[in-house]
C-alpha cells in the first residue's frame, strides 16, 4: 500500500535519527515535567494545610473512625499483637490492645497510634515507623506502672508521611510512601527538631531542579526538532532543485518557473512547519493532557470526571454555536456587500434622478437599502456580540456548579483544600495544551497537502535524458534543421509548435518573431535540449541532437534570454559563472567586446560589485551587455539572443550595434528582436503564429508580400520604427 506523502516526508527524518529521537524524548519530558511541577504544587499545598502532622484519632471524623475500626478488626490477633509489641508499650497492655476496636472504646485512640506505626512500617519502612513511635508514645511505663500516652498539642510532624496516613486507601498514599523511602529528608526532622523544614527546603530544590531540567528539555526539543526538520527541508529543496533541471518544459517561459518556486519555498516551508509541530506539539501536548487527566482522577475520580465532562459539554456546545453564527455572519456579510453595491448604484444615478425628477423615489429606495444594509450588518456582527458572552456564561455556570460540588466534598471532608488546588490547576491546565494540539492538527493538515504537492512534483518523470553511447557534437559548421517538429507542453498538453520545418545555415543571422513568447522560447529550449520535440527531429550538421551528448551540445550553444540576464552576485561571477577555468584577462576581454568594461570600472567595487536581485541596480542596457559578455566568453558556435523590451537610449543602441559587429562574426545567431535595426540586419526572418511557421524570408520581401508579417510588424515594431 502506498504511503501518504506526509509519511514519506516523515521518513526523511531518518537521515537525522539522533535529532529526531532527542526532539521526541525531550517533548515527552517537557510534558511530563509540567505535570510534575503541578504535583509539587500539590505537595506544597498539602504541607501548608496539614503542616505535615500525622492525624490523631480525635482528628478523624465519624466515618474515618469507623473505617479504622473495620480495618483494625480485619487483622488477625497475631498481627495485632505484633503491631502492639513493636510500640514502646508494656507487655501487660498487649492483651488489652490486641482486641476488637470500637469507636467508643477508650483503648481505640491508642490502637490508632499502633495502627499508624504499623502502616508506616509497611508503607515507608522501619525508620519512619520508628520515628513516629518514638514521638507518639511515652516511655514504656510511667511512675504508677501504667503506660503513659503523649497528647502533644502539636502532634507528630512527619512531612510527606502525613499525606500517606490521611489518604492511606488512595493511590497517592502509595506514591507518598515510595517518595518517603527514596527521600528520607521528606519526613526526618532537622537538627533543630523541626520535621517540616527539610521537607519544605527539599520541595524548593526539586522545583528549581525541575524548572532547570524543563528549560533544558525545551531548548533541546526546539534545537533538535529544528535541526531534524531543517535537514528534511534542505534535502527536499535539493531534490526539487535538481528535478527542476530535469523538467525542461519549465524553461519554455519565465512564468512557468513559478511552480517550482512555489514548491521550493512555500510548500516546503509548510511541510517543515508540520513536521516541526508533529515532533514537538503532537508528542508534548497529548502526554501533558493524559497526565493531567490522570492526576485529576487520582485526586478525586468523580469530581475529575464531572469537571472533564462539563468542560467537554461546554466545548461541544460552543463549537456548534460558533459554526452556526459563523454561517450567519458570512451570509450577513454577503448581503451587506449586495446592499452596498445597490447604494453605490443609487449614488451614481444623479443625472437620471435629476433629469426625470426621481428625487422622492430614489430617496425612498436609498432608505430601504440602508435599512437592509443595517439588518445585514447586525446579522454579521451578531456572532461576535453573542458568541463570546454566551461561552463565558456557559463556562461560568459550569464552573459555579463544579465549585458547589467541590464545596460539598470539602465540607463532608472527602476533599481538602490542597486537593482542590491541585484538581483545579490540573483541569484548568488542560485547556491550553488541548487548544494548541487542535490548532497544530490544522498545521499538519496543511503540511500533508503541501507534501502531496511536493511529491507530485518530484514524482514527475524527467523529460530529457542522454542515451547510452551518445556522440560528441562538433561545432556547428553547416546547418541547423527542424524537420516536422511538433511540441506539446508536458504539463498542460497544449500544442506549442505544430509541424515546424525550417533550416538555418551556419553563420547566418536569423530572427524569430511572433506574438507568443512561449513559442519563441520553445525554439531556444529545443535547440539546447531542455525539452525534446513530441514529433519530428532537430539536426545539427545532419546529426539528430537526441543522439549527441548534452554537454557537447550545450557547450557550443549560448543563451541570452530576457528575465535571466543576471543573478544576485558580483559582476565577475555573472560573467564567469564562477568557472575558475576562465582567467581575469579573458573576462575583461569579453566585457570590452560588448562595451561593458568601462561602466563596470565605474561601479563602487568594479568587477566585485554585487548587482542586486536580477541586476536591478543596473539599467536594462547594462544588464544586457553583461549577459552578452557571459555568452561571448564561452565562444559559442550558436548564439541565441533575446533583446530587452525596454526602450534603450541612443548611446546604448550604438554601443550594441558596434558590439554585434564584433562578436557575431562567423557565428550562427538566432535573434528574438525588439529593435527594428536588429530585425533589418538579419539574413532571414521566421514568423511563428499559432505554433506554425506561417512565413519566412527577407524582412523587406515579407513586409511587401506577407499580410500577417505586416500586421505583426506594425503591432510589435512600429513604435521602434518611429524612434529609429
Image (cartoon, rainbow, N blue to C red):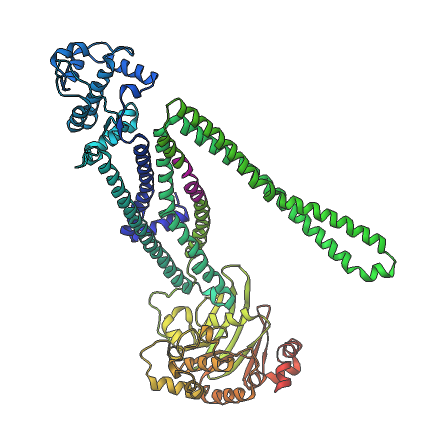
Q: Nearer the viewer, residue 542 or 560?
A: 560
Residue 448 in the image: state x and y as whole percent.
44, 49
Task: Kindly report the secondary structure that dominates the magenta region of the rendered protein.
Answer: helix
Query: Which corner quadrant holds the C terminus?
Result: bottom right
- Work out whether 582 lies above or below 139: below
Magenta stretch containing residue 317, yes or no? Answer: no
Figure quadrant of the N terminus: top left
349 in relation to 90, above or below: below
Residue 639 at what x, y percent from top left? 45, 79
- Across and down, in percent, residue 492 comes to 53, 59
Would you say residue 113 is visible in this rendering? yes
Q: Residue at x 34, y 16 (%)?
A: 62
The residue sitting at 38% across, 60% down in the picture is 237
659 or 687: which is nearer to us? 659
Most foreground residue, 415 or 13: 415
Up-down relation of residue 342 to residue 258 (above or below): above
Locate residue 291 relative to residue 626 in the image: left or right: left
Drawn side of residue 48 relative to residue 356, left or right? left
Q: Quadrant of residue 723?
A: bottom right
Which range is magenta?
426-438
Amino acid at each position: 500500500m502506498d504511503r501518504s506523502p506526509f509519511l514519506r516526508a516523515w521518513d526523511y527524518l531518518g537521515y537525522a535519527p539522533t535529532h529526531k529521537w532527542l526532539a521526541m524524548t525531550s517533548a515527552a519530558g517537557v510534558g511530563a515535567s509540567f505535570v510534575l511541577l503541578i504535583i509539587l504544587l500539590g505537595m506544597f499545598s498539602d504541607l501548608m494545610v496539614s503542616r505535615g502532622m500525622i492525624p490523631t484519632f480525635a482528628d478523624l471524623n465519624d466515618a474515618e473512625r469507623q473505617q479504622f475500626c473495620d480495618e483494625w478488626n480485619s487483622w488477625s490477633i497475631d498481627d495485632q499483637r505484633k503491631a502492639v509489641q513493636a510500640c514502646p508499650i508494656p507487655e501487660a497492655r498487649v492483651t488489652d490492645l490486641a482486641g476488637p476496636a470500637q469507636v467508643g472504646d477508650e483503648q481505640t485512640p491508642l490502637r490508632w497510634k499502633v495502627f499508624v506505626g504499623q502502616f508506616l512500617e509497611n508503607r515507608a519502612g522501619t525508620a519512619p515507623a520508628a520515628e513516629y513511635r518514638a514521638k507518639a508514645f511515652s516511655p514504656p511505663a510511667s511512675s504508677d506502672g501504667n503506660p503513659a500516652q503523649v497528647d502533644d498539642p502539636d502532634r507528630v510532624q512527619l512531612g510527606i508521611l502525613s499525606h500517606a496516613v490521611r489518604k492511606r486507601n488512595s493511590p497517592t498514599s502509595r506514591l507518598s510512601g515510595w517518595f518517603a523511602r527514596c527521600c528520607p529528608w521528606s519526613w526526618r526532622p532537622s537538627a533543630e527538631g523541626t520535621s517540616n523544614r527539610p521537607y519544605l527546603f527539599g520541595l524548593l530544590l526539586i522545583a528549581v531542579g525541575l524548572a532547570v531540567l524543563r528549560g533544558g528539555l525545551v531548548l533541546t526539543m526546539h534545537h533538535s526538532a529544528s535541526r531534524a526538520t531543517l535537514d528534511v527541508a534542505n534535502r527536499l529543496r535539493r531534490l526539487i532543485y535538481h528535478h527542476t533541471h530535469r523538467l525542461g518544459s519549465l524553461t519554455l517561459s519565465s512564468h512557468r518557473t513559478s511552480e517550482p518556486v512555489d514548491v521550493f519555498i512555500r510548500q516546503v516551508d509548510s511541510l517543515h512547519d508540520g513536521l516541526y509541530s508533529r515532533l514537538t506539539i503532537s508528542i508534548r501536548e497529548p502526554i501533558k493532557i493524559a497526565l493531567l487527566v490522570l492526576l485529576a482522577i487520582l485526586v478525586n475520580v468523580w469530581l475529575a470526571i464531572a469537571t472533564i465532562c462539563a468542560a467537554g459539554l461546554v466545548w461541544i456546545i460552543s463549537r456548534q454555536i460558533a459554526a452556526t453564527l459563523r454561517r450567519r455572519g458570512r451570509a450577513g456579510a454577503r448581503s451587506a456587500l449586495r446592499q452596498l453595491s445597490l447604494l453605490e448604484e443609487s449614488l451614481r444615478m444623479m443625472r437620471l434622478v435629476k433629469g426625470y425628477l426621481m428625487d422622492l423615489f430614489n430617496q425612498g429606495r436609498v432608505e430601504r437599502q440602508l435599512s437592509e444594509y443595517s439588518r445585514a450588518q447586525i446579522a454579521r456582527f451578531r456572532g461576535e456580540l453573542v458568541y463570546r458572552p454566551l461561552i463565558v456564561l456557559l463556562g461560568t455556570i459550569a464552573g459555579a456548579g463544579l465549585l458547589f460540588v467541590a464545596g460539598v466534598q470539602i465540607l463532608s471532608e472527602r476533599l481538602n483544600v490542597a486537593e482542590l488546588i491541585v484538581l483545579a490547576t490540573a483541569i484548568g491546565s488542560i485547556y491550553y495544551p488541548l487548544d494548541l494540539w487542535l490548532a497544530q492538527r490544522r498545521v499538519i493538515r496543511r503540511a500533508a497537502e503541501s507534501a502531496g504537492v511536493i511529491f507530485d512534483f518530484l514524482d514527475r518523470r524527467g523529460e530529457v535524458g542522454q542515451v547510452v553511447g551518445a556522440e560528441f557534437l562538433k561545432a556547428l559548421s553547416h546547418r541547423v534543421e527542424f524537420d516536422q517538429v511538433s511540441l506539446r507542453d508536458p504539463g498542460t498538453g497544449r500544442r506549442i509548435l505544430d509541424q515546424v520545418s525550417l533550416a538555418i545555415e551556419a553563420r547566418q543571422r536569423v530572427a524569430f518573431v511572433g506574438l507568443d513568447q512561449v513559442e519563441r522560447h520553445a525554439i531556444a529550449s529545443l535547440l539546447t535540449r531542455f525539452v525534446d520535440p513530441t514529433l519530428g527531429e532537430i539536426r545539427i550538421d545532419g546529426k539528430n541532437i537526441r543522439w549527441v551528448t548534452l554537454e557537447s551540445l550545450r557547450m557550443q550553444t549560448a543563451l541570452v534570454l530576457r528575465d535571466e540576464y543576471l543573478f544576485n552576485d558580483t559582476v565577475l561571477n555573472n560573467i564567469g559563472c564562477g568557472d575558475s577555468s576562465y582567467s581575469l584577462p579573458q573576462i575583461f576581454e569579453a566585457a570590452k567586446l560588448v562595451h561593458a568594461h568601462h561602466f563596470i570600472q565605474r561601479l563602487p567595487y568594479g568587477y566585485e560589485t554585487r548587482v542586486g536581485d536580477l541586476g536591478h541596480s543596473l539599467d536594462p542596457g547594462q544588464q544586457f551587455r553583461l549577459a552578452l559578455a557571459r555568452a561571448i566568453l564561452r565562444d559559442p558556435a550558436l548564439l541565441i539572443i533575446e533583446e530587452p523590451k525596454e526602450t534603450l537610449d541612443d548611446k546604448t543602441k550604438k554601443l550594441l550595434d558596434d558590439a554585434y559587429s564584433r562578436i557575431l562574426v562567423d557565428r550562427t545567431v538566432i535573434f528574438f528582436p525588439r529593435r527594428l535595426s536588429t530585425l533589418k540586419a538579419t539574413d532571414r526572418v521566421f514568423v511563428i503564429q499559432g505554433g506554425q511557421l506561417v512565413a519566412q524570408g527577407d524582412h523587406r520581401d515579407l513586409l511587401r508580400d506577407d499580410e500577417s508579417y505586416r500586421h505583426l510588424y506594425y503591432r510589435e515594431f512600429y513604435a521602434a520604427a518611429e524612434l529609429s
